[in-house]
Image: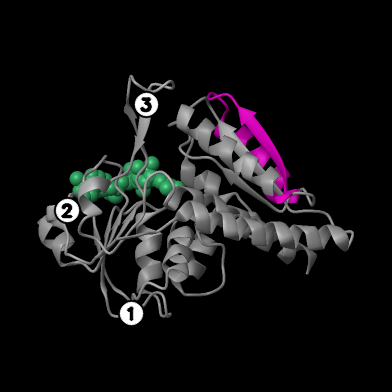
Amino acid sequence: MILLDGKKISEEIKNEIKFSVEKLIVNRQRPPHLAAILVGEDGASLTYIGSKIRSCDQVGFKSSLFRYSSDISEIDLIKKINDLNLDSEIDGFIVQLPLPSHIDEHRVLLSINPKKDVDGFHPTNFGKMALGLKSFVPATPYGIMKLIEKYDIQTEGKSCLVVGRSNIVGRPISILMSLRGKYANSTVTIAHSKSKNLLELTSKADIVIMALGIPEFLKSDMIQKGSTVIDVGITRVEDKSKKNGYTIKGDVDFKSVSKKAKYLTPVPGGVGPMTIAMLLQNTLDARLLNSS
Ligand code: NDP
């Protein structure tokens, strides 16, 4: 089994980004600036935002975090987004999801200037991505595509099963895998909670991408020998032996699947770090777009 080492590849990408930032500085230009909006106190969101900010420091980006309490109104949140849209010192920004239930996520995402939408969730970027045009691609699917490319995994004509149809992972990765391109050109099936005969689908797929959020759901007897398995899942599972009280689990039973798959991403250290690296890449691209 070949481990798809997202930690290592993401470090390589971050070093390339850092080099590009150093070139900007040498040319007396300002570094890229990523801003993040966080509403509420969700523990997982705080962790994700924390690592995004730390990664900005690592590559020489400027970063700003705007925190609001969970009772902020939708109107006030959109006003803040408008300020960021107009701020010429900020190249890109993200609104950490999920948002509290009284806020309409779609209205919020629609209010982001697509040129600063480094998460790639705005319909303009999503539509361009679906058409195979240049756009900001959502960071998690972008990271998966990069891993596939870096490990030279053959995808053309292969059957690819995506389990999960969310707008941030399942649906975009299913589109990307079906587009024309050397590391795409797959025959894609997308499964979700209403799908029947999941076992039949997983056992026939050459490539299985798991993005459902159920710990260790995929077992070795569900896959073909020699398949490629990408585990997107990140779930905190109670673990009293750990200082923080939890352990992180993916959607794949790593121990058993690693004996049968040809390629496999670990959790942690697989798709997670790639997601952050690709968010930084989108921000660098936004910065360069800004100066051109
Ligand atoms: P969502 O909860 O938005 O979507 C889950 C999807 O899984 C839904 O489409 C749902 O179907 C489907 N599903 C649920 N149960 C089953 C089942 N038994 N069989 C088949 N399909 C099922 O999750 P996300 O896409 O946001 O995230 C998925 C996982 O990936 C989570 O663990 C999340 O933490 C992780 N994640 C990791 C990232 C990373 O950087 N590594 C980034 C983003 C997410 P239906 O649509 O019918 O409800």
Magenta segment, which residues? 59-86
Badge 2 or badge 3: first in the primary sequence: 2
* Type of amino acid under label 1: Glu
Callout 2: CB less than 8 Å from ligand 1? no
Instruction: Find the distance from the CA under tag 2 to the CA under tag 3.
Output: 25 Å
Residue occupied by mark 3: 246
Q: Nearer the viewer, mark 1 or mark 2?
A: 2
> In the shown orientation, is residue 64 left or right of residue 39?
right
Work out whether 205 lies above or below 180: above
Q: Name the disc covering residue 247, or none.
A: none
Q: Quarter of the image holding residue 26? A: bottom right
**Residue 254, visible in the rendered structure:** yes
Q: Quarter of the image holding residue 134? A: bottom right
Work out whether 109 lies above or below 75: below
**Residue 122, visible in the rendered structure:** no
x, y percent for residue 151:
43, 68
Work out whether 226 lies above or below 234: below
> In the shown orientation, is residue 80 left or right of residue 162?
right
How many labels, in total? 3
Local SS, label 3: strand
Residue occupied by mark 1: 156
* Type of amino acid under label 2: Ser
Question: 168 or 151: nearer the eye?
Answer: 151
Residue occupied by mark 2: 220
Local SS, label 2: helix
x, y percent for residue 249:
33, 38
